[in-house]
Image: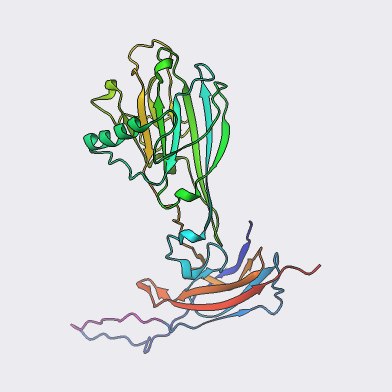
Amino acid sequence: MVKRTTATQTMKTKRITYLAAALALTVAGSSCEHDEIYEPLEFSVQLAPTNTYKTGDPVVFNFGGNADYITVWNGDTGHEYKYRDRTSVAFEDIEQCTLEIEISQQYSKANIRNLNMLVGNQFQGLSGSDAEADRQIVEAIEASRQGNDYPGWETLQYEDNNANTFATYTYDITKYADNFTFGVHLFQNEEDMGQTMKTYRINPKIQVKIKGYDTQEYSGVSIGERFITYSLADIHADNPYIHNISGNGNLRIQGLGTGDNSAAVIVYQGFSAGASGMPSPVRQFGFMRPMALNTITPDTGQSIKGVTDDVKSYSYTYDKPGTYTVTFLVGNGNYQGESGIQTYEMKVTIIDPIE
C-alpha cells in the first residue's frame, strides 16, 4: 500500500497589527507590560475543481486564511481522527491471529526431542521476582506433563531433525487472543540421558488481522522482552531466573539485557554428551508474559504546515474506494505559544476508475 502526499510551500513573513504600534513612552520611572495578542484565526478548505476522486489520482485541498499550524488526518486506515486515542478494539473485530515460528535444530540424533513449545490463554504468568512462588507454578506445569501434553496448554507440532536449517510453521492462535501466552520447555527424557543435547534457535512472530485495520505484528525483541525464564535444574538453584549467560546449556533471549544471541530471538545452546558442568537433567522454562492481542497503535495525523511555512494546498492519493472523513486541525501561535486549536471536517468519496 503506497500513499503519496505533497504540499506546496514557500517561506513567508506574517504581519500582525497591534493597536497603537507606533506609540512610544519615554516617561521616566514608568514601565510597560505588553499582553500577547493573537491574530484571530481564519481558515477555510475547499476541494480543487480539477479533482477526479478516483483511486490512484491525487485529491487536492486548497487552503485559505491565516492558520500557522495545520495537521491532517486523511481518514483512511490508521489515519482517522476519531481513533486518535484508541488503543484497543473489540475482540469480535479480530479476524485471525497467527503465530509463526522459525525453528532450527542442530546436533544430537534427528529423532530426539528436547523442546516443547506451548501456547494458551489460561496462564497468568510468572512474577519474575518471587522465586519460591514461581517455582511452585513451574513445578506444577512440569508435573502435569504427560508425554508432550500439558493440561491447559496446546503443544505446538513440529518435526524433529538436526539439519541446522530453519523450518517455518504457522499456527492459528485466534482462540487465545484474550490472554495469549507462549512458552518453551527444554528437557531431557529419561531414555535420552547421556545423549547430546540439541541446540535450538527460534524466531517467533505474531500477526493479528483486525477488521478494517492494518495487520498488527509483534516479533523479535518485542516478544523476547516479555519473557521470564525459570530453571528447575539443581545447578541453577541459586539463580533460577538465569538467562543470557555465555556457554553451553544456557537459554538466551533477545530483549532480556546483555548477552543475548543474534542468531535468533530464542536460543538454547545444547551440549555434548557427558559435558562437564551441564545441568542434568535439563529442566528449563521460558514464558512470555500474557497479553491481549486486541491492542493497536492509535491513529495518527500528519503535520503539513508550521509557522514559517506558506502552504496553499495539500494533496493525497487514496488507493481504495470509499467515503473518507478528512479532518484538519489548525491553530495560530507565536513565540509564546499557540492559540486554541480548531477542527474542520469534510467527506471525500473515492471510486474505482471506470474502464
In this rendered view, identify the residue nearer to me: 145 or 269.
145
Q: How is the image coloured?
A: rainbow
Q: Position of residue 90 (x, y in %)?
A: 46, 62
Overall secondary structure of the magenta stretch? loop
Q: Residue at x 48, y 50 (%)?
A: 175
Picture quarter with the N terminus = bottom right
Mark yes or no: residue 52 visible: yes
The span picked out in magenta is: 29-38
Nearest to the observer: residue 150 or residue 207:
150
**The C terminus sits in image quarter:** bottom right
Is residue 176 toward the left or the right of residue 169 in the image? left
x%, y% of residue 115? 45, 27
Task: Tell me residue 13's x, y (percent).
Answer: 50, 74
Residue 331, given in percent of the width and then of the height, sits at: 44, 76
Q: Give left or right: position of 283 versus 207.
A: left
Snapshot quadrant of residue 35: bottom left
User: In the displayed structure, does residue 41 sit left or right of residue 355?
Assistant: left
